[in-house]
Image (spheres, rainbow, N blue to C red):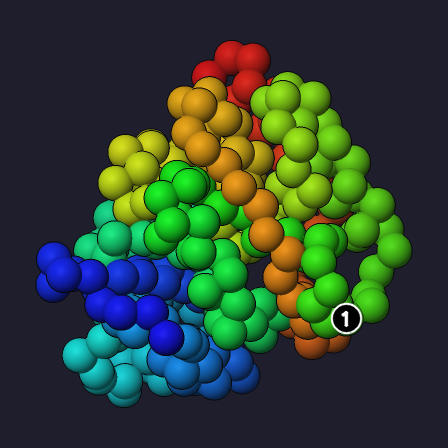
Amino acid sequence: MDRAPASGKPLLSVVIPCYNEVATIASLIERVRQAPVASKQIIVVDDGSSDGTRELLEGLQADDLTILFHPHNQGKGAALATGFSAAVGEITIVQDADLEYDPEDYPLVIGPIQQGRADVVFGSRFQGGAPHRVVYFWHRLGNGFLTLLSNMFTDLNLSDMETCYKAFRTEIIQSIPICEKRFGFEPEITAKVAKKNWRIYEVGISYYGRTYDEGKKIGWRDGVRAIWCILKYNLWA
């Protein structure tokens, strides 16, 4: 298990954007707590949930838990921007509120930053030998296309630009203005870290994807928006 930083700060801030995840959020928070990282700050940003998630979160009180509320739904990017501003750990990682990504992988993702080799780390669902649930062919094809298009403009060789698991040295992510309110955050942040020439690593992670019946939210419109964001943030912004 990692040791807490000598600075007294938590090693890791975990930012969890959350919208209508009443079935999973409590379990996810507990799994984050049990993740093998010595000191963690857990930040949950409820993005205007209407399914009872907000009320559930209002009943949770703990020293390691910061809960922030948006008055209405704004989107994943907006929730992340709110969460990043509250981070005090040396490293900040994004964690979805469902159970698709396993907090047991945190040491893998933040390891290159702890070792002084990286400033930003992407957790790839398509590398390594960890378990991957088999779900949608067209999602995989679309993800591959968006990653390829992003790589063509950033000159990176990522295998999974759209991954949730992105970790940053906290001062880096707090220095980047987040403009995209929804899922356009992924191509936006990829373009912006590439332009800054920060050291970017990628590690293989496990993935337990959901079906739409189980609550998956991203759709084809988000893919179209991602194409626009790749062009916008690489060419004009």
Q: Closer to the camera, 18 or 96?
A: 96
Residue 236 placement (x, y as % from top left): 51, 12
Relative height, residue 181 to residue 55 (above, below)? above
Q: Is residue 162 left or right of residue 219?
A: left
**Residue at the location (64% across, 52% down)?**
124
Residue 102 placement (x, y as % from top left): 55, 72
Considering every residue shown, the one lying at the far top of the view is: 236
- Quadrant in the picture for residue 128: bottom right
Relative height, residue 188 to residue 110 (above, below)? above
**Residue at the location (56% across, 13% down)?**
235
Q: Closer to the camera, 155 or 80?
A: 155
**Residue at the location (45% across, 33% down)?**
199
Q: Closer to the camera, 210 or 111?
A: 111
- Quadrant in the picture for residue 30: bottom left
- Quadrant in the picture for residue 177: top left
Amino acid type, callout 1: Arg
Q: Is residue 123 left or right of residue 46?
A: right
Residue 232 placement (x, y as % from top left): 56, 20
Determine which residue is flagged by label 1: 133
Relative height, residue 195 to residue 23 (above, below)? above
Quarter occupied by the N terminus: bottom left
**Residue at the location (25% across, 40% down)?**
171
Q: Closer to the camera, 142 or 167?
A: 167
Q: Is residue 222 left or right of residue 16?
A: right
Regarding mark 1 in the picture, which secondary structure is present there?
Answer: loop
- Give the total number of marks visible in the rendering: 1
Whether residue 81 is visible, yes or no, is no
